[in-house]
Image: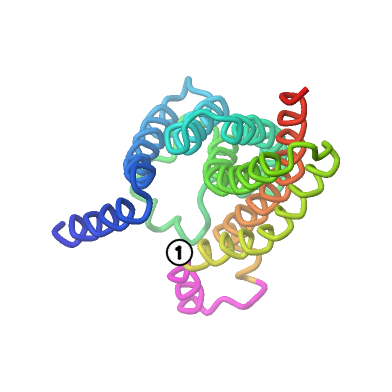
Amino acid sequence: MNVLVLLAAILFILMVVIGGKKGVRSFFSLFLNFIVILITVILMTSPDANPIILTIIACAAISCINLFYINKVNSKTITAFISTVVTISILIFVIYIITKKAMIQGFGEEEVEELSIFSLYLGVDFIKISAAVIIMSTIGAITDVAISITSPMREIYEYHPTITRKELFTSGMNIGKDILGSNTNTLFFAFIGGYLGLLIWFKDLSYSFGDIVNSKVFGAEMITIFCAGIGIAFIIPIAAWVNAYYLVRKKK
């Protein structure tokens, strides 16, 4: 516990020194996001709740915290929020269909022995739960990319107010292309780094490469990575177009 408090204090000090007031808001936003996720998970345990609807509401709340609470309400956060909502709305259907077709919901055979003492009649839709988990895993990266595009686009517009909508959109796309590869790789290493223990477990079970690829646990994580990458690719043109349309329309 002392280590956690010490690390939290170090993080808080660094965020205050480097980010000032925005750094303070960013630090407290971590706890706000955790509270939103915790409440969402508790509500999902109810058989009467719809995990997809709860996820959409939670994603909207997390987007508001990450955009409006940290960066305040302005043109770049408004367009980033609109772009995030549009992207999530598209992804929610894509991910639900993929989750249903790939049958990655529920537990893998490696987990059956540990779960044998528990009742599996939970009364919840695991397809929707799996889709909700993937969406929640991508929301942070999507909002990050959205604000990373809309913020420099607004700077470009302020220094070049005569720029056309097409030129502004092209600038946004060029910015997005620069951050696409780095963010996708960041997601990949974040998930793989968190599941190194799983790979070691597969080695202890003497799994072949084919067994690993066809494992439900591994497949679910790889699908999450790919869906997050799809979300990042989607948000770039959407954020660039929404921001270009908003800024030029506002000028007129």
Characterize the magenta stretch by its predominant secondary structure: helix
Outermost residue on the top side: it is: 48
- Image height check: is 39 above or below 153? above
Left of 168 or right of it: where is 124?
A: left
Q: Secondary structure under badge 1?
A: helix
User: Which stretch is magenta?
Assistant: 195-210
- Image height check: is 195 above or below 52? below
Q: Nearer the viewer, residue 160 or 8?
A: 160
| Residue at x-position 35% and y-position 44% | 118
Q: Amino acid at mark 1?
A: Gly
How many numbered badges does the structure rendering display? 1
Is residue 207 shown in magenta?
Answer: yes
Characterize the local packing of mark 1: few (<14), some (14-19) or many (20 or more) Cα atoms within 10 angstroms: few
**Which residue is under mark 1?**
194
Residue 155 image position (x, y, % from top left):
64, 44
Image quadrant in which the N terminus is located = bottom left
Left of 13 or right of it: where is 36?
A: right
Residue 181 image position (x, y, % from top left):
68, 63
Q: Nearer the viewer, residue 193 or 141?
A: 141
* Image quarter of residue 210: bottom right
Left of 230 or right of it: where is 19?
A: left
Residue 165 image position (x, y, % from top left):
82, 36
